[in-house]
Image (cartoon, rainbow, N blue to C red):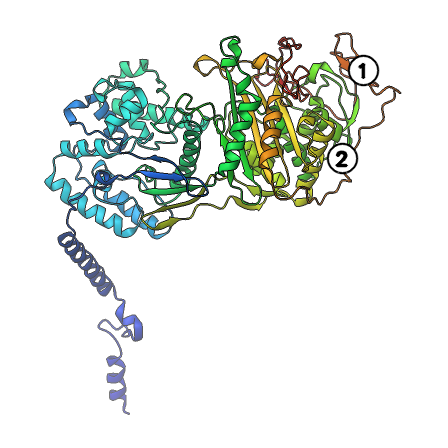
Amino acid sequence: MGRAEARRAQKSTRKKGGKPKKTGIRRFFTWKKLLAYFVTLIALGAGAFVALYMYVDVPDGKTEMKLQSNIYTDAKGKILARTGQVNREEVTLDKVPDSVKNAVVAAENKNFWSDSGVDLKGTARGIFNTLMGRGKQGGSTITQQYVKNSYLSQEQTVTRKVKELIITLKVDQKVSKKEILEGYLNTSYFGRNAYGIQAAARAYYGKDVKDINTEEGAYLAALLNAPSQFDWTSATDAGKKNATDRWNYVLDKEVEQKWLDPAKRKDMKFEVPKPPKAPEGLTGQNGYIVEAARQQIERAFRKSDRGEGALARGGWTITLSIDAQKQDALEQAVKDKVTSKLDKQARKVDNYAQVGAVSVDRKTGKIVALYGGEDFTKHQISNATREDYQPASTFKPLIFASALDNKSKTQDGQPITASTIYDGTNERPVRNSDTPFAPQNEDHVSYGNVTVQDAMNKSVNSVFAQMAVDVGLDKVKKTAVDLGMNGEAGGFDERPAMSLGSMSASPLHMAGAYATLANHGKKVTPSIVASLSRNGEKVTLPDPIGSQVLSRTHADDVTNVLRGVVNDGTATAVQSSAYAVAGKTGTSDDNKSAWFTGYTPDLITSVGMFGEGPGGAQVPLTGTGGVGRVNGGGYPAEIWAAYTGQAADGETEFDLETDEAGAVPPPPQPSSSAKPTPSASGQPTPSGSATPSTKPSPSSSGGTPTHTPTDKPNPSHDPTDKPKPPTDKPIPPTGGNDGGGLNELRLRD
């Protein structure tokens, strides 16, 4: 090849301007071609959207017009209740006060009156998050929510979201804003099985929507964000705070939109809504059982794509785990041991006694029996699930479990086991605590040096207050929550007083925590729903049996120690020759609550008794049934024993793998007498220990309360059920402050 030919060949391989031509895949990605691709993609997308827009029609039917009943059955298929009748009454927009309309618009879609009906950014984000599997997404306009309520399902899928977008655009073109808002207000779910603003006004305030004021309207608008979580009657402390925050948010948005005068807003105060009325037909225990199932299902739906309100739309068949024979046995036990002995005419206090109980099968985690109160139509608050009373000393086993789990040591560096020696001196200040705390023991008794086993048997407050600090209050709380308690319950603060059960708890949560111990440390979250289906579709709910949260050895060690409480402690009333028993009593010092939570190898049952006065005020139980102080070893333990005697089946002995060789006996006392000696105050003091004194004795492990749980069976309560005259005098307040703001906090047992 000549030079001229070579130059021509070289030129032919270059672009204009002297650059080499791109070869291979690079020739498809010039900036001009990328722009062309982008324009083509946009055109295709627009074309597809136009095609979909032409293809998708606005449906005729409204899903809210097809609401059905829910059917609840027991474990054998017997129908317990039917619920879910449509609780909805349509009202025209002119019947809704402007303040209520403004509250809803301010809360849900402040630009409603001027927007195109679609939040493109929010919808795109929702589609993207759905594709990424990030669950339920909000951000829809009122028009979009109206379309979803009236024409579509609640499922979170890309197909449904695209349909929602297209139908919304069409509805916004054909329907006026007033009609859309009216439809939205009449189809939205507000909780308490109330669909629509009129049903909500009646459910929460007992009046028509036309009579709802600005403050009430703001609360109804706030409910749209989380109906069940913001329902004041059933909300947790966190839920109530969130509801109040949302209420304030709604009013502030109204001010921002100039729909509410700032001066009036400043003077507004949150008004607590009325408690719910029981639906007809849910009499006796059925109402409590159905309500427990409803709460469980709605919690599960909130965490799924179905969303809140899916259950209330109806059509569900809910099979419950309730065992009819065990349920009958529990109801009979409460009647025989408590309610039949109450004389509400002769004794005022007998009107205030409330009993709650939950019984759980260890192997399945299913609730087999539940007692919520006298009658759901008379008392809607379920004593089985309420979380406003303190569990007192039933919390102590969880402290010991945490000590074992964390391999904790005493102040002297000794590992904490059932045989570890602690100082049980009355009012002994807790050592190395940021908050001063010097708890009283029951009746101001000083026990001197005692083993952990004996301290559990006698429920010695000074020992467990020090143990909680030795373990670490944060670690104790973590263990309790891991086992099944509610960490958001009121009073669950990381202070020494928590060692005496100063937080709030329910029989349901205590049954769950003890069930986890009984299940060798494998988490049990009690479930009352055995199966759930709708139109042939079965819904899978979380398994009640979870992962290992406490080692088997440590869980079995706690069970072993709790056997000692039954064999030689405050719970001797539940002893049985037919099966092994482990458990713990608990009684608040002011006698507002009394508990026994215990278990056989297969059945865990928590029984609580609560003093509830007028307006829901907590009042002492002292004198109930004609006895003196009501202790956990009295009525609650007797109910437990009567029920378990009929309901227990299966294994009779615990299968334990422990580090301890059985219940540890108490240490030898320096005195030859084993009997307690009276103190100057007239109260018994165990031999070898100091007479009760406000001066603590030195020791290697410390403590502190103004709170004193007790566990002794009531001496005036005859286990043979023959009534005796009361011999216990009401305990005078002991006063005090644990330094953390809990004034006059006193727990016994």
Indicate the position of residue 466 as horizontal and vertical percent values. 70, 26
Residue 663, disc:
2
Q: Is residue 54 left or right of residue 378?
A: left
Indicate the position of residue 430 as horizontal and vertical percent values. 70, 22
How many residues crowd mark 1 within 10 Å: few (<14), some (14–19), many (20+)?
A: some
> Where is 542 relative to 247, above or below?
below
Question: In which quadrant of the rendered view does residue 408 lie?
Answer: top right
How many residues crowd mark 2 within 10 Å: few (<14), some (14–19), many (20+)?
A: many
Q: Residue at x 78, y 15 (%)?
A: 685
Q: Nearer the viewer, mark 2 or mark 1?
A: 2
Question: In which quadrant of the rendered view does residue 187 lie?
Answer: top left
Instruction: Decide which of 369, 563 is in the foreground and name it.
Output: 369
Closer to the chain start, of discs 2 and 1, is 2
Location of the C terminus (image quadrant): top right
Instruction: Decide which of 740, 83 is in the foreground and name it.
Output: 83
Q: Which residue is mark 1?
A: 690
Indicate the position of residue 2 as horizontal and vertical percent values. 27, 91
> Where is 287 relative to 164, above or below?
above
Amino acid type of the residue tagged 2 in the rendering: Ala
Q: Looking at the image, do the residues carrying marks 2 and 1 touch, with CB atoms under 8 Å apart?
A: no
Amino acid type of the residue tagged 1 in the rendering: Ala
Question: In which quadrant of the rendered view does residue 738 lie?
Answer: top right
Indicate the position of residue 720 as horizontal and vertical percent values. 66, 21
Location of the N terminus (image quadrant): bottom left
Question: Is residue 486 in view?
Answer: no
